[in-house]
Amino acid sequence: MLSKIVRTVANQLILFVLVFGLYVIAHGHLTPGGGFQGGAVIVSGIVMLLVAFSSHELSKSVRERILSVMESIGAVIFVLLGFAGLGATFFYNFLAGSPIFGNIPPTGPNPGDFWTGGTIPPMNFAVGLKVVAGLCAVVLALALFTGGEEVEE
């Protein structure tokens, strides 16, 4: 475990890292980013907490079952959004032109409206949830088993 200063700074920075990760996920259809990139940003915050605190302290609050359920929920949401537009084609953007995430963007260069993505923003959130759960599980497993430590259930 590192010094009290490192732990305090990590506790203060985690909120900003989480908000930035959510921003990258939410604006993935307008800017470079999306579910995978935003999920990786959020997991980098988890890694920061892992470095500041011990892996056993972090594994007490983040359980494998919770991560597994989060990953499954992300996959189910993604697949359901893919099948929801099946009246036309698989992954049809059925929300385009609707009141929810559906304003039709003007042609040509435009500043980008958050509400023009259709089904892309919900899919980005589903991918982000899956990436956060998967990468977090990998990082915690590596941290717990690298030093020959056993997982306590």
Image (spheres, rainbow, N blue to C red):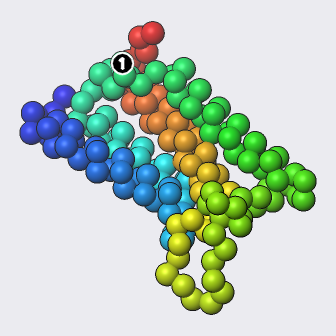
Toward the viewer: 17 or 105? 105
Query: Along the horizontal axis of the image, is 70 left or right of 142?
Result: right
Residue at the outermost top position: 153
Residue at numbered disc 1: 60
**Amino acid of disc 1:** Lys
Where residue 122 appears, x then y in whole percent? Answer: 61, 51
Residue 136 at least partly seen? yes
Where residue 32 appears, x then y in whole percent? Answer: 51, 69
Residue 37 at least partly seen? no
Dividing the image into 4 quarters, which one contains the C terminus? top left
Task: Please name the residue shown 14% across and 38% down the image.
Answer: 8
Where residue 145 appears, x then y in whole percent? Answer: 43, 24
Task: Please name the residue shown 47% across and 36% down the image.
Answer: 136
The part of the image, by quadrant, that contains residue 94 is bottom right
Task: Please name the residue shown 41% across and 25% down the image.
Answer: 62
The answer to whether 94 is drawn above or below residue 55 in the figure is below
Toward the viewer: 37 or 146? 37
Where residue 132 appears, x then y in whole percent? Answer: 50, 41
* Circle 1 crowding by C-alpha within 10 Å: few under 14, some 14–19, many from 20: few
